[in-house]
Image (cartoon, rainbow, N blue to C red):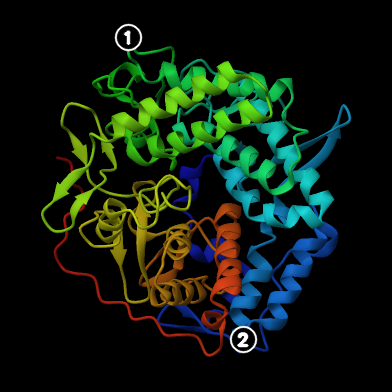
Amino acid sequence: MHRRKFLQQSAMAGAGVLVSKYSKAFNNGKAVFNVDEFPVVRIPVGQRKFRSESVENLINDIQANVGNKELAWLFNNCFPNTLDTTVEYSIINGKPDTFVITGDIDAMWLRDSTAQVTPYLPLCKKDKALQKMIEGVIRRQNKCIIIDPYANAFYKDASKVSEWKETDITDMKPGVHERKWEIDSLCYPIRLAYNFWKETGDTAPFDDHWKEAMTLVVKTFKEQQRITNQGPYSFQRKTSWATDDVPMGGYGYPTKPNGLINSMFRPSDDATIFPYLIPSNYFAVKSLTQLAEMWEKIGKDLDKANEARALSKQVYVALQDFTVMHPKYGQIYPYEVNGYGSINLMDDANVPSLLAMPYLEATFPTNVTYLNTRRYVLSEDNPFFFKGTVAEGIGSPHTGLNKIWPIGISMRGLTSSNTKEMAECIEMLRTTHAGTGFMHESFDPSAPIDFTRKWFAWSNTLFGEFIWKMYREHKDLLKAPPVPVAVNPPSKEKSRWKIF
């Protein structure tokens, strides 16, 4: 089922029995529980897809040592959600193979699957079963890229025909669920493979399939620089959703060739307005640098390493021409540009985002331009930053106006250097799960019971990663009673869209 179809689901339908059972336990939209009466919402042991002893030990450690029992309960539910509900692990031809669905959609996104399992990587050294499972994700991603490097989501069955076959005008291949070209779809598998190698020292998945897939990654990036022509990719969809279609015959609005990579879609799976998506290009710079190191040290191919490194440098140099002097915030990064002078100022909660660039190691957290940009995207000058009476945060055109994303709140905490801000993010997440015990795609910042997607594993696992980081580095922020968060009411006047 397509993600759009979940936008019309009410929170009452999404939360099901939990909301009806605990509907009286809400105060101004916040879930309120007696700390001794948290309901059991994690899937029963016998129905869990994959068990990690290290993950279970970490859960037990946090439950025993975190003062705020609601946060410990949320961690217990959210951090293992990917393993509990989305992982299909098997051995194929003697090698691990792991298919990872997003949650309520039975398909594997290259982005989501990486984001869902990356937080488990530090546990692999003491958990070989977990290490093998993640090796299987890398191998499955390589298979997917080889099927079609322009696709963003795939079926487990390589012969399955997409549900979008009749509506999408593009070169749709069997096994592909959706063929939306997004730069980050090829960056995330590099990120996973690189960090897997660095954490474990294991080079088993870097075989001929990996080499073939990575060769296609660089080839595709170069094609989408569109230096001499538009390249082989185009996409159109017969739909009433404007953000699901690509204009100008499926090639997007024109860009001036300058070394940047065109991305027809954002990580939200929404079409870009201007195809030079800045945070995704920065992500590509980092990913190509990592790929070059892997080609050199694991693949033993200096030509491939030099090719990746040269492309990374070319994109980076081109990016230096695209910052904006904002009258209030100073020099900032735009979200999208076209090379002709047109600029889209905004940010989207989906990662890669401008906010998340340090998390992806695409810039330093102390970079002045990033810090200026951060102040901008976390303000009401960002047309997709919303404030309510309960919470505030970045949303997305994907879910419409006045819906903020827990992913954005978790990412704000993960990239913050301010303990007060971290505490505020923790408190917003603690009080907006709508009694379900899980994170969602988005919610109304004045009424968290109005949310989209009750089963969204990426959001759950990222929340767990945030709480784990706080446990290691700022354990005092997880104490009870929780630190109250002050959320100012939304301003009456606000521009919702800025394109210059």
Q: Nearer the viewer, residue 77 or 360?
A: 360
Percent x, y of residue 404 = 38, 60
Question: Is 179 above or below relative to 79?
Answer: above
Which residue matches tag 2?
A: 67
**Is residue 397 left or right of 149 when viewed as pictured?**
left
Task: Kindly give the residue lying farthest to the top in the view shown.
Answer: 228
Mark 2 is surrounded, within 10 Å at the Cα level, by few (under 14), some (14 to 19) or many (20 or more) other residues, namely some
Question: Is 293 above or below relative to 391?
Answer: above
Question: Is 263 above or below relative to 148?
Answer: below
Q: Amino acid at mark 2?
A: Gly
Residue 436 visible within the image: no
Q: Which mark is residue 228?
A: 1
Percent x, y of residue 63 = 70, 78
**Is residue 2 left or right of 270 when viewed as pictured?**
right
Residue drawn at the location 80% of the way across and 43% of the way down: 132
Count of numbered marks = 2
For the C terminus, which image quadrant?
top left
Q: Quadrant of residue 69?
A: bottom right
The residues bearing labels 1 and 2 have C-alpha atoms spaced at a distance of: 60 Å
For marks 1 and 2, the one nearer the N-term is: 2
Question: Is 56 above or below relative to 237?
Answer: below
